[in-house]
């Protein structure tokens, strides 16, 4: 109450209130900052947000928190600076330690560092200078530690903000990642020391992240220790996709073994993380696609666009075989000459495509953006709907714009030709069932006459030595959300999640009841340490329980189904790299087979109006788009223009920049 404080200037008190209100606003923003980006998040799954939508909420919560924190510090700094100026320029007023620097208020004396927990008595004002925030100038160590921790916390947030700029995130992702994992804990520590109730505001976000992330990461780490050679890679194809900027550009098609549980839980739209410890400690996300006709394997298509994928492609290059070995590119490389890089693959993450909710679905992809839609096409071509049924998809139409002739040929041979072959002469199922109409249109925008070299195929499935026992089929996390519909199989996940949250909140309740005094700096860190060890302990027990009970199911799937004939693994064969004319793609001419229509076009990009034309008149249309920002923006504007005319349409988008 300003009127009740006659010894303080009303403006000064109002400034303090505004500054503290901004601090509380920042804490409220931080309280849900991690909810959208927690791995295997139940909340994101329940709300059916895509990772892109969840990341938008995370970014805006962070921006609001950083802005409020900056305002909080600026207002307090303005008040302290004004008071120091007032003392310095009015000699008639009491001045504490004439000539002392204002910034000494941010540097506690050595005695405060030695007795941070116990030194709560007022000290000689001459040891603090004009930075003392108290009106009477009688400061204690806490008053200066508040300034120091606030300044360091704000600097950590500024670094986070700068490293999160789109240009830095796109061009210097490693810098962005390192700054996040280093500056975020620093800010958390400084904020906890700055205000004794900070941990109460941040606990929802911290506990939620711990409950969703720690069990999966501990399980993944345990699997890496038991299987040091990582996932069982069956084959890798290096598809040449040169561009003016990258003449050596390529797309890697990595096919890996999948356990029966992975095949059961996989859905189109899921992605996984790939970690190659010899290249990077960071896990890299990639979309997973099914292998048509095989439920014992999955594939990843990755374009060599950054340091990680470029170096990974180089590791698979036959030119990197030991120089002492005489290699003939037209014959298999000797098994002793090559060892594939160790790849640890974890998943699944993300939502499956919600195409079943719409009667007409348009898929628009650019370049490598075709990957999320490959499995969807196979599923849609095999789907059946009953006559007169509502809420079922009637038509799926794909428009894929791509300039890489090699990638087009690869997708055609592995997916489009499979769909055409499987559904040739397919007029439907039972008398009252009708298949979904599938239309695939490929727009080739590359040069009309190029040399399309054959992809280099590294075949680890047909080799001449025994399988490596340290590799294993890809196994999804036991703590993934929504992967298992059986309640009994989700009990352990529920107990783990509930235990971390309930015990964590209980410990915080005890801490709040015994809140340390405002001057006790060390006491503020204790609940943070307690929550860390509590979450780690519960997660470790849950992972150990999974390993002991389900080892035969989760870790020994090799016995459940023979994945590789002959139990051989490890060498590869490289076909000749002599070129062949790519266009006119005579073997890929447009044709129709049953419910599937395939069209091949060359020369120009399709107009956005042409891409979305089939959505007109649909009851519940949807547009799924994955590609460069320009493609996504143009299609979004076209759909929004149609909505202004009364045609509503849902848009699911994913943007990437090469």
Image (cartoon, rainbow, N blue to C red):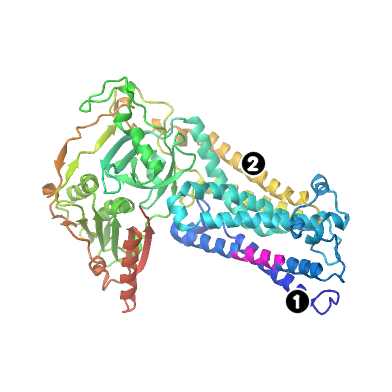
Q: Main secondary structure of the magenta part?
A: helix
Q: Is residue 590 magenta?
A: no
The image's mark for residue 314 is: none
| Residue 281, image x, y percentages | 49, 39
Please indicate whether residue 366 sits to the left or right of residue 158 in the image.
left
Report the Cα–Cα distance between label 1 and label 2. 50 Å
Give neighbour class at mark 2: few <14, some 14-19, many 20+ (Cα, 10 Å).
Answer: some
Residue under label 1, please give it.
11
Please indicate whether residue 374 sits to the left or right of residue 472 in the image.
left
Residue under label 2, please give it.
537
Compare residues 473 and 629 and report the one nearer the observer.
Answer: 629
* Residue 332 in sight from this viewpoint: yes
Compare residues 649 and 543 and report the one nearer the observer.
Answer: 649
Magenta residues (range) = 67-77
Q: Secondary structure at mark 1?
A: helix
* Dot placed on the residue nearer the N-terminal end, 1 or 2: 1
* Residue 199 in sight from this viewpoint: no
Quadrant position of residue 359: bottom left
| Residue 454, image x, y percentages | 20, 38
Quadrant position of residue 4: bottom right
Query: What residue do we see at 83% from left, 67% from top?
Result: 135
| Residue 624, image x, y percentages | 33, 61
| Residue 147, image x, y percentages | 73, 58
Give neighbour class at mark 1: few <14, some 14-19, many 20+ (Cα, 10 Å).
Answer: few
Query: What residue do we see at 77% from left, 48% from top?
Result: 522
| Viewer-nearest of discs 1 and 2 | 1
Question: Given contact means CB atoms under 8 Å apart, are the residues at marks 1 and 2 in contact?
Answer: no
Compare residues 471 and 158 and report the one nearer the observer.
Answer: 158
Q: Which quadrant: the N terminus?
A: bottom right
Please indicate whether residue 544 sits to the left or right of residue 193 in the image.
left
In the rendered view, tell whether residue 318 sits above or below residue 155.
Answer: above
Q: Is residue 73 magenta?
A: yes
């Amino acid at each position: 109450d300003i009127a009740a404080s006659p010894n303080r200037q009303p403006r000064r008190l109002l400034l303090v209130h505004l500054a503290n209100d901004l601090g509380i606003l920042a804490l409220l923003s931080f309280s849900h900052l991690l909810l959208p980006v927690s791995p295997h998040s139940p909340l994101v799954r329940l709300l059916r947000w895509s990772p892109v939508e969840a990341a938008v909420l995370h970014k805006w919560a962070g921006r609001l928190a950083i802005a409020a924190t900056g305002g909080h510090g600026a207002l307090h700094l303005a008040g302290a600076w004004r008071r120091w100026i007032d003392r310095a320029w009015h000699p008639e007023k009491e001045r504490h330690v004439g000539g002392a620097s204002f910034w000494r208020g941010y540097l506690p004396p050595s005695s405060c560092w030695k007795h941070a927990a116990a030194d709560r008595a007022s000290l000689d004002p001459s040891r603090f200078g004009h930075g003392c925030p108290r009106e009477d100038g009688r400061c204690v160590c806490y008053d200066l530690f508040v300034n120091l921790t606030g300044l360091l916390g704000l600097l950590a947030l500024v670094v986070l903000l700068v490293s999160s700029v789109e240009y830095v995130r796109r061009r210097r992702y490693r810098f962005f990642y390192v700054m996040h994992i280093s500056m975020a804990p620093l800010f958390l520590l400084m904020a906890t020391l700055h205000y004794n109730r900070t941990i109460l505001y941040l606990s929802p976000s911290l506990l939620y992240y711990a409950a969703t992330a720690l069990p999966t990461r501990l399980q993944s780490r345990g699997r890496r220790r038991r299987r040091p050679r990582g996932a069982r890679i069956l084959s890798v194809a290096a598809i040449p996709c040169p561009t003016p900027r990258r003449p050596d550009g390529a797309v890697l098609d990595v096919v890996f073994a999948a356990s029966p549980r992975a095949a059961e839980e996989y859905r189109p739209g899921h992605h996984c993380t790939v970690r190659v410890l010899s290249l990077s400690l960071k896990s890299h996300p990639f979309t997973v696609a099914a292998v048509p006709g095989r439920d014992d394997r999955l594939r990843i298509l990755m374009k060599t666009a950054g340091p990680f994928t470029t170096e990974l492609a180089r590791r698979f290059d036959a030119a990197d075989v030991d120089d002492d070995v005489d290699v003939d590119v037209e014959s298999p490389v000797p098994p002793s000459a090559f060892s594939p890089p160790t790849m640890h693959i974890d998943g699944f993450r993300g939502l499956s495509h919600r195409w079943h909710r719409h009667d007409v679905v348009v898929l628009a992809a650019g370049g490598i953006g075709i990957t999320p839609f490959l499995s969807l096409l196979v599923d849609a071509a095999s789907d059946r709907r009953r006559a007169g049924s509502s809420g079922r998809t009637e038509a799926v139409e794909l428009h894929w714009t791509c300039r890489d002739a090699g990638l087009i040929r690869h997708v055609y041979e592995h997916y489009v030709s499979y769909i055409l072959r499987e559904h040739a002469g397919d007029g439907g199922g039972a008398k009252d069932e009708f298949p979904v109409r599938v239309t695939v249109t490929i727009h080739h925008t590359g040069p009309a006459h190029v040399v399309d070299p054959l992809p280099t195929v590294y075949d680890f499935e047909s080799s001449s030595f025994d399988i490596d026992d340290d590799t294993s089929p890809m196994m999804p996390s036991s703590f993934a959300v929504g992967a298992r519909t059986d309640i009994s199989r989700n009990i352990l996940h529920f107990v783990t999640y509930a235990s971390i949250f309930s015990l964590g909140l209980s410990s915080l309740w005890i801490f709040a009841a015994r809140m340390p005094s405002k001057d006790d700096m060390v006491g503020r860190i204790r609940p943070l340490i307690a929550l860390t060890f509590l979450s780690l302990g519960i997660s470790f027990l849950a992972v150990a329980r999974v390993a002991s009970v389900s080892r035969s199911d989760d870790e020994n799937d090799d016995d459940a189904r023979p994945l590789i004939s002959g139990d051989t693994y490890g060498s590869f064969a490289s076909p000749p790299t002599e070129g062949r004319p790519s266009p006119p793609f005579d073997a890929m001419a447009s044709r129709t087979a049953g419910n599937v229509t395939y069209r091949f076009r060359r020369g120009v990009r399709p107009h956005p109006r042409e891409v979305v034309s089939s959505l007109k008149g649909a009851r519940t249309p949807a547009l799924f788009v994955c590609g460069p920002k320009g493609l996504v923006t143009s299609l979004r504007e076209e759909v929004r223009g149609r909505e202004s005319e009364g045609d509503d349409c849902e848009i699911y988008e994913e943007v990437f920049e090469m």
